[in-house]
Amino acid sequence: MTDIELRPSRDLDAETLTINMGPQHPSTHGVLRLVLELDGETVVNCQPVVGYLHTGIEKELEYKTFQQGMVLTDRMDYTAASCNNLAYALAVEKLIGIQIPPRGQMVRVMIAEMSRLTGHMIWVGTHALDLGAMTVFLYSMQDRERFMDLIEMASGHRLTPTYIRVGGLSDDLPDGWLENAREVVALLPGMIDQYEGLLTNNAIWMSRTQGIGTITAAEALDLGLTGPSLRGSGVAYDVRKALPYCGYENFDFKIPVGETGDVFDRYLVRVAEMRQSASILKQALDNLPDGPYDCQDAKYIRPPKIETMLRMEQLIHHFLLVTEGFKAPRGEAYVATEGAKGELGFYVVGDGSNKPYRAHMRSPSFINLQALPKMCVGRMVADVVACIGSLDIVLGEVDR
Amino acid sequence: MSDSAPAAADTPAESPEPPPEHPLVVALREGVTGLSGVTVTESRGMTLAHIPDAGRIVDVCRFLKTDGDWEFVMLIDIVAVDHRDSEPRFGLTYTLHSISKNQRIFLKIRVPGGAAVVPTMTTLWSGANWMEREVFDMFGVRFAGHPDLRKILTPDDLEGHPLRKDFPLGNVDVWPEGADTNVAR
C-alpha cells in the first residue's frame, strides 16, 4: 500500500482581483468609475476615475455673456440647481459691485434652501435605496415633488430653473406661491420624521452605516472636505455662518455636527440640516419684506416688459441687454456659498467686456470625492456603496 | 507751466509717514526665510497676497497653516488663469481659510508659459491632489513632486489643454477611434 501523497497546497491568496465599478452602475450615483482592487471581499485599492460627464462648462462660460452663462450653471449640481445659480450670481454681482434689495435676498434664500432640500431628499432616497431600504426612496421622491412644484411655479422649470439671475431674479414670486409654500413647509417636519422613522433606529441601517467609512476631523481638513461630509467629522464649518451672504446672518439656525465621522454621522448631519432648512424657510416666509426684488439698475436689469412697448429708452436698454449684455469691470471676485454638498464657490475674472475672462466653479463634490479611497480601503465591497452614498456626490458637479 | 519743488526759502516739507505694512507682509517676511517682495492688496473685500517667487508658495502655505497667529488650516481651491497677453502667462490662485480666525486669503503666483512648473501642495494637503490634476489637465502647468500627475476630466485621447486661450472652443465633429465615419447623411 503506497502512502497517499497530500496534494501540494496552492498559495490561494497571492492574487488580487481588479474590477471596475461603473461608470454605468446604479449605486455610483452617476457616471463614476471606480477601479477596485480586491483581495477576496476586501478593498485593497480604490481609484476613482472621473470625467465621464465633463462637458467643458468653464470653457463655455468664457464664450457666453454673464446672463447667458447663468443657464449653464444649473447643469452642474442638477439636484440642487438654484444653489449653483446663486453662487454664480453672487460672484458676478461682487465683480460688478451691485447690491440686491432685501426682498430679492430673502427670495433667493428661500429658493436656495428649497434646492438644498431637493438635493438632500434625492440623497436620502438613493442612499437608503443603495443599502436596501427602498421605501424611503419612494417617500422622499414624492415629497420632493412638492418642492419641484413650488420651484416650477416660480421659475417655469423643475430641474434647471435659472430663477436666480445676475442682479436679482428672473421675476417676482407669482400670486399664490407664498400660500403654497407655507403649506408645504408646514408638512416638511413630518416628511423628515418619516425618513428618520424608517432609518435612524433601524438595526440594519445602523449596522451598515455605523463605524463604516470613518474620517477623523484632521483627515477631513487634510482632504479638503467641506459641507456635511466635513461636519460629520466634527468640524463646525458652514459658509452660511462663517461668511454669510444673502442675509443669512439674520436667520436663526444651528449647524449640526457629528462626532465620529462615519457614514451614520454624515446621515444624521444631513437629516438635521433638512430640519434646519425647514426652520429657515419658515422664518423667511414669516418675514418676507415687500419691495423690489432686483437691483433696479437699468444697466444690468431688463426693464418691465410693458415699458419696453411704451418707451424708447427702455426698449433700447432691453435690446442692448439681450443682444450684448452688460459689461463687467476688470478684476476678480470669489464668493463662497454653502451648497448642498459643501462649499460651492465661483471665481470670476472680468476683463472689461461682456463675457467672463475666466469662470471657475469650486466644486464641493469634486474635492470631496478624493476622500473615497480613504473611506473604502480595508473595508468590504458592500461598504463602498455606503461610502459613496454618504459623500453625496453629483457627477455633474464633479465633472462640470 | 510745471510746478517745481518749493524754493529753498521755504522750510523743507516733512516727508509723509510711510503707510503701515500689512501684518501679513510682516509675518511672511519674518516667518519664511528668504522671502521678500510680498504685496498684499484688498479688493472687493478679498485679501490678495502676491508672492513674487512662485517656487516658495509651499513654504508660504506651510507657515500660514502652522503659525498660531494665522492657522489657515483649509485649502479651499487652486485656480489657474491664462493671461495670454502677459508673461508670466499662468496665474495661480491658492485660496486658504482659517476656521479659528474666520479669515480667508488668496495667494497669487505667476508662472511662465514655457515649461510651467510649481512645487506641489500635496505635501501639506492631500486634497490638493485633484485640484492640481485639474490645473494640469486644463492648462498644462506641471506640479513638481505630485504623486500622480495625469489628466482627470478630459478624455484620454484629447491632446492639448482645453482652458488655454489658444485652444478652440470646438464645434468640430468628434468620432471615437475606429468608428466608421462614412455615414450617409
Image: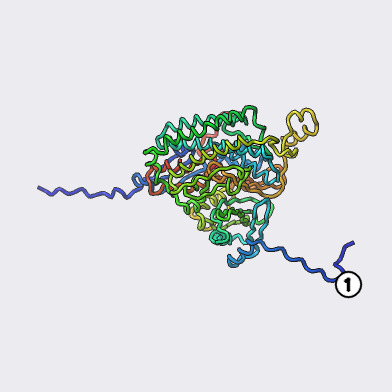
Mark 1 residue type: Ala
Q: Residue at x 45, y 51 (%)?
A: A216
Question: Label 1: which residue?
Answer: B9
Name the residue furthest left. A1
Q: Nearer the viewer, residue B156 or A96?
A: A96
For the question of whether residue A74 can be seen, the reply is no
Q: Position of residue A133 (x, y in %)?
A: 41, 34
Query: Is the image coloured rainbow, by chain, by secondary structure, or in one colour?
Result: rainbow
Residue A291: image quadrant is top right
Q: Nearer the viewer, residue A272 or B75?
A: A272
Q: Position of residue A261 (x, y in %)?
A: 45, 48
Q: Quadrant of residue A178?
A: top right
Residue ID at (47%, 37%):
A124
Element under disc 1: loop
Q: Picture coordinates of residue B159 (x, y %)? A: 56, 46
Q: List x then y, in percent, for residue A333.
A: 65, 48
Q: Please say whether residue A262 is visible from this viewpoint.
A: yes
Q: Quadrant of the C terminus of chain A?
A: top right
Q: Residue furthest right?
A: B1
- Whether residue A253 sits left or right of residue A233 in the image: it is right
Above or below, comparing residue A40 to residue A289 in the picture: below
Front residue of B108 and A220 = A220
**Near-viewer residue (A353 or A316):** A316
**Label 1 packing within 10 angstroms: few (<14), some (14-19), many (20+):** few
Q: Is residue B171 left or right of residue A53?
A: right
Q: Chain of mark 1?
A: B
- Quadrant of res A175: top right
Above or below B59: residue A89: above
Q: Please tell me how many numbered marks the rendered image carries.
A: 1
